Image (cartoon, grey):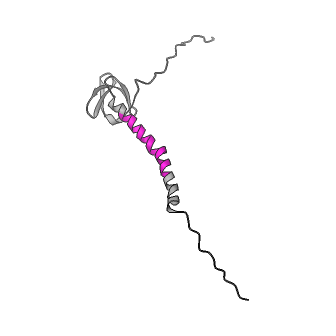
């Protein structure tokens, strides 16, 4: 018995080059909005914070050192961390201004209302 060879159609055309590029473009857009843009906004806010530093601001450095700004130079900030103790740090290492942050309220219930 003889096998009959039928003419098979060629493989169908795959998606066009634009459709192949679409998933990659979507990943790049998601990457931009989830990673790059928030980091740029954070850097902009930090730059504004550094530019707006002034004397007597209480700040925290990147290493966790708290102090009061005593002197501002071009790139160096002098902090007073204790009475008559001054430390010089680079402006870029100032993380936050803590004088603008609310301070915790002190508890004034020294034995009041306690049962004996």
**Residue at 32% from the left image edge and 34% from the top image edge:** 91
Indicate left or right for 61 with 22 as reference: left
Residue 43 higher or lower than 68, as above or below: below
**Residue at 41% from the left image edge and 41% from the top image edge:** 40
Q: Residue 114, how many percent across, how many down?
A: 61, 12
Residue 24 higher or lower than 99, as above or below: below
Whether residue 81 is visible to the viewer of this picture, yes or no, is yes
**Residue at 29% from the left image edge and 23% from the top image edge:** 84
Is residue 30 magenta-colored?
A: yes
Is residue 88 magenta-colored?
A: no
Q: Residue 109, how many percent across, how many down?
A: 55, 13
Q: Quick one: quadrant of the N terminus? A: bottom right
Q: Residue 64, how many percent across, how many down?
A: 40, 32
Q: Which residue of the protein is positioned furthest toward the left in this rendering?
A: 74
Main SS of the magenta segment? helix
Q: Quick one: quadrant of the C terminus? A: top right
Q: Which residue of the protein is positioned furthest toward the bottom in this rendering?
A: 1
Residue numbers of the magenta segment: 27-47
Q: Which residue of the protein is positioned furthest toward the right in this rendering?
A: 1
Whether residue 62 is visible to the viewer of this picture, yes or no, is no
Residue 45 higher or lower than 30, as above or below: above
Determine which quarter of the picture holds residue 9. Answer: bottom right
């Amino acid at each position: 018995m003889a096998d009959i060879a039928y003419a098979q159609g060629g493989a169908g055309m795959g998606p066009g080059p634009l459709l192949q590029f679409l998933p990659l473009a979507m990943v790049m857009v998601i990457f931009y909005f989830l990673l790059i843009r928030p980091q740029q906004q954070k850097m902009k806010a930090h730059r504004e914070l550094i530019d707006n530093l002034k004397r007597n601001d209480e700040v925290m450095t990147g290493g966790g050192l708290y102090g009061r700004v005593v002197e501002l130079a071009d790139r160096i900030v002098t902090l007073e961390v204790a009475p008559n103790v001054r430390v010089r740090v680079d402006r870029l290492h100032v993380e936050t201004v803590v004088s603008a942050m609310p301070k915790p309220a002190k508890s004034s219930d020294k034995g009041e209302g306690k049962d004996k």
